[in-house]
Amino acid sequence: MSKQAFTAIMGFGNPVRSDDGIGCYVIEKLQEQLRDREDIGLFDMGTSAFEVLFQLKGSTKIIIVDAVIHTGEPVGTLYKVPASEIDTAIQDDPMVFLHSLKWDQALSYARKILGEEYPEDIQVYLIAVDNTRLDVNLSSEVLEAGKKVVQLILEEVSAIAQPLHPN
C-alpha cells in the first residue's frame, strides 16, 4: 500500500471453518469490485493477521467484517457496531496467537503500532453464526448476510472520493 491515505477493509475468519470464514468471503468479493481503487486496502485476516497490521499505516478509516457466535439471534443476523462501543471491547491479551487474531485484538495491536496515526473512523460488521465446523461452505443465511455487507461497503466506499492521478 502506498503512503497516501486509504480506507482499510479487514475480513477476519477461518475459511475452512464454515461460517467463520465470512470475513474472508467479503474481502474476496470486494477484491473483484475494488481492485482498481488505490485508496482502498483490502486485507484477508484469515491466516496472516498480525503481519497485516503494519500495513495499516496511512489508513484514515478501518472497516472490519467478522463472524460472531452465541449471540442468541438467528444465524445471519447482521450487526454494525458503533465506533463508540469499539474502545470498550478492545482487549490486550498477552496470550494472543499470531495466526488467530480476532478483530478486537487486532484493533488493540493496531492502536499500539500506529500510535498517533490510529484512525478515529472505525466500523465493525459482525454476522451471527453457529456453524464453525470443518467445512469450506458458508450457510445460506450467513452467505446472504455477507452479500449484504459487501453491498453496504461498496455503497460506503463509492461515496469516498478517489484521489486524482496526475497525467
Image: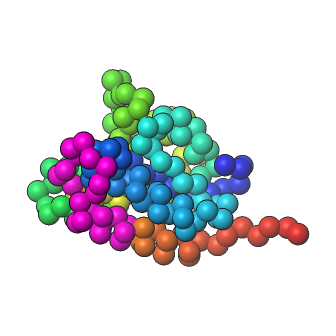
Using the rendered image of the protein, determine whether residue 59 is visible from the camera's viewpoint: yes
Q: The C terminus lies in which quarter of the figure?
A: bottom right
Using the rendered image of the protein, determine whether residue 63 is visible from the camera's viewpoint: no
Magenta range is 129-149
User: In the depicted view, which residue is nearer to us: 158 or 130?
Assistant: 130
How far from the left and from the top, in percent, is residue 84?
Answer: 36, 56
Residue at point 66%, 49% (across, down): 1
When the figure is inspected, residue 156 is found, relative to residue 49, above or below; the finding is: below
User: In the depicted view, which residue is nearer to us: 37 or 92?
Assistant: 37
Q: Is residue 71 left or right of residue 155?
A: left
How far from the left and from the top, in percent, is residue 81?
Answer: 32, 59
Work out which residue is located at the far right of the displayed protein and give it. Answer: 167
Q: Is residue 132 left or right of residue 59?
A: left
How far from the left and from the top, in percent, is residue 47?
Answer: 43, 37
In the rendered structure, does residue 68 fall within the stretch colored magenta?
no
Residue at point 61%, 62% (across, down): 35
User: In the depicted view, which residue is nearer to us: 161 or 51?
Assistant: 51
Residue at point 36%, 28% (across, down): 96
When the figure is inspected, residue 77 is found, relative to residue 151, above or below; the finding is: above
Q: Quadrant of residue 104?
A: top left
